[in-house]
């Protein structure tokens, strides 16, 4: 079962990468952008058919490896 | 209006980064993982109140800058 996870920087953490993307977009003519924030996306195929259990496994992965909980939040999305 | 975009590698494109994450997870005891694929996530705050128009703007950004359409797919998600 495929579970997706999105890792984003917490609201108060500066995102210089997003800032650069915003400037690049600005230079290309997209003038009406207030903010860009970049995050990471993981699609994890777990050998588990119960959606709830699969999500719990991925949540544990986020806590232990994928996300740095000091500065990042994670969000689990079900199958896509 | 905040619009999110997810950029993923196309199905047939190798994802060595995802492979390394899978191996790391395996080493940490998560043995039941079939595949991990990593992608990028963008949260873009556009000065546009019409959801449809905002999504169109972000789609254009994906085509022109954020995604490499030769090897990547993009998916626009509405407000979150």
Image (cartoon, coloured by chain):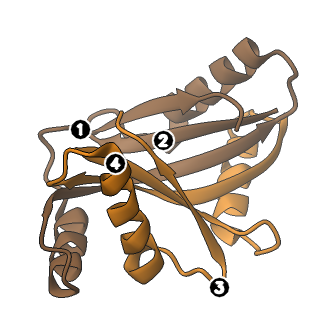
Chain colours: A orange, B brown
Q: Which mark is residue A3?
A: 4
Taking the image as shown, residue B2 lies to the left or right of residue B47, namely left
Choose mark 3 or mark 4, whichever is in front.
Answer: 4
Label 4 crowd bin: few (<14), some (14–19), many (20+), radius 10 Å: many
Q: Nearer the viewer, residue A64 or B63?
A: A64
Q: Quadrant of residue A41?
A: bottom left
Instruction: Report how far apart the C-alphas of labels 3 and 4 lie in the structure.
Output: 23 Å
Tell which subunit mark 3 falls on. A
Residue at (75, 34) in percent of width and height:
A30
Instruction: Report how far apart the C-alphas of labels 1 and 2 lie in the structure.
Output: 12 Å
Determine if marks 2 and 4 fall on one subunit: no
Label 2 crowd bin: few (<14), some (14–19), many (20+), radius 10 Å: many
Tell which subunit mark 2 falls on. B
Instruction: Report how far apart the C-alphas of labels 2 and 4 lie in the structure.
Output: 14 Å
Instruction: Report how far apart the C-alphas of labels 2 and 3 lie in the structure.
Output: 23 Å
Residue at (68, 56) in percent of width and height:
A37
Kindly identify which residue carries mark 2.
Answer: B6
Q: Give the x, y percent position of residue B31.
A: 12, 73
Residue at (56, 59) in percent of width and height:
A39
Kindly identify which residue carries mark 3.
Answer: A70
Determine if marks 3 and 4 fall on one subunit: yes
Choose mark 4 or mark 1, whichever is in front.
Answer: 4
Under tag 1, what secondary structure? loop
Choose mark 2 or mark 4, whichever is in front.
Answer: 4
């Amino acid at each position: 079962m495929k579970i997706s996870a999105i890792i984003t920087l917490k609201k108060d953490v500066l995102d210089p990468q997003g800032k650069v993307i915003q400037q690049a977009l600005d230079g290309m003519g997209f003038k009406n952008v207030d903010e860009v924030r970049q995050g990471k996306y993981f699609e994890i195929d777990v050998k588990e058919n119960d959606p709830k259990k699969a999500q719990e496994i991925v949540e544990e992965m986020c806590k232990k490896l994928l996300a740095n909980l000091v500065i990042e939040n994670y969000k689990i999305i079900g199958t896509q």
